[in-house]
Image (tube, rainbow, N blue to C red):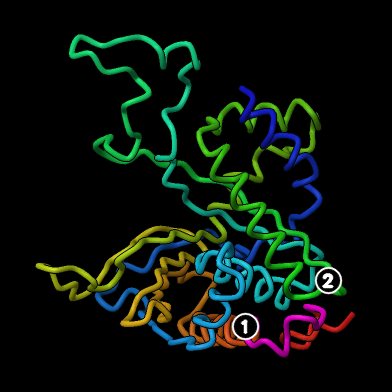
Amino acid sequence: MLDVKWHAERLAGIHFHRKALYPPALTPRRANMGFSDGLDYSFDVPALVEFKHRHPHIAGSVIFKAAMALVNVARTKHTHALFANLEAARSSMPFWPDTFRHINSTNGTTLADLDASDVSGPTMNGVINLIPVERCEKVLAFLNRVQSDQIELTKHAHAPWRHIIKALNDQHPGEYAGEMLPNTVRAQFLSWVPGLLGEYEKIRVERMSIRTAQGLVIVASLGGEKGTEYKVTLRWDVANYSAEEAKAFIKDLEATVRWLMEEYNWDWPVRICLGMGR
């Protein structure tokens, strides 16, 4: 419930950011059921090596997420970016009081000896990213803020959605604030998957199918020989979005990641990116 409280406080004003939902649903969303159901794309960012050397605490996934926020805001012209992402939620065992960690099991180990990453099956949850994009904020400050936010999202990933939705609706009766959570997931969703699109010893991925009626689904990873190649697969709502719009989105995303990684841009305000203006 502490995690629920954290999310409810953080998302208290989410119902004021309906304009941030991208892409919007002018008609009911519809999944692409055709054989060619999406777009696979990759791009290499050599400048990432020097950036990671200088700023090792900022994850490659966070750089990608920060770029997503800027691309979204450049399209919506809103003050915030709003999208969902999956958290693996394997950093700790959820809902266990600390006192349990000192209880001995039959084989002499304690619960503290158990590693959450050893749990079989999916232990994951969706979280909502509500990212203010302050046009005058400098690039490094923006990246550090998104990184700090990501650490907290991972820390509080186990919160049950139905309780967050209820807490938001109780805070704002009649505003349907809680419904913004599923609406956000239906609009845009990021899943970061290490080893995406073929980096396996004994398996070669030929193609990936993701058939879901969501506005824009982005599955991404970072790999390549030097760990500087972003690999992305996109799926979209064919009733409200097109392949051309998806291609334009990923091209802008690539350009934004490259722009963020260039050292001479680190002291520039983020409004310079994609000509967002004031």
Locate the C terminus and report the quarter of the image it occupies.
bottom right
- Spatial CA distance of label 2 from label 1 is 16 Å
Residue 256: image tag: 1
User: Where does label 2 land, which residue?
Assistant: 137
Q: Amino acid at mark 1?
A: Thr
Q: Residues within 10 Å of mark 2 (few under 14, many from 20)?
A: some
- Where does residue 70 sit, x and y in percent of width and height? 69, 73
Q: Secondary structure at mark 1?
A: helix
The residue stretch that appears in magenta: 260-270
- The residue nearer to you, when weighing 126 against 202, is 202
The tag earlier along the polypeptide, 2 or 1, is: 2
Kindly identify the residue that appears in the image at 48 percent across and 21 percent down: 95
Q: Secondary structure at mark 2?
A: loop
- Where does residue 221 sit, x and y in percent of width and height? 40, 69
Residue 275 in the image: above or below residue 64:
below
Residue 134 part of the magenta-drawn span: no
Query: Could you say which quadrant of the image residue 57 lies in?
Result: bottom right
- The residue nearer to you, when weighing 128 against 98, is 98
- The residue nearer to you, when weighing 241 against 22, is 22
208 left or right of 146?
left
- Where does residue 204 sit, x and y in percent of width and height? 15, 73
Locate the N terminus and report the quarter of the image it occupies.
top right
Residue 264 part of the magenta-drawn span: yes
Q: Amino acid at mark 2?
A: Glu
Residue 118 in the image: above or below residue 50:
above
Kindly identify the residue that appears in the image at 33 percent across and 34 percent down: 115
Residue 28: image tag: none
Kindly identify the residue that appears in the image at 70 percent across and 27 percent down: 167
Kindly identify the residue that appears in the image at 65 percent across and 40 percent down: 179
Query: Could you say which quadrant of the image residue 255 lies in?
Result: bottom right
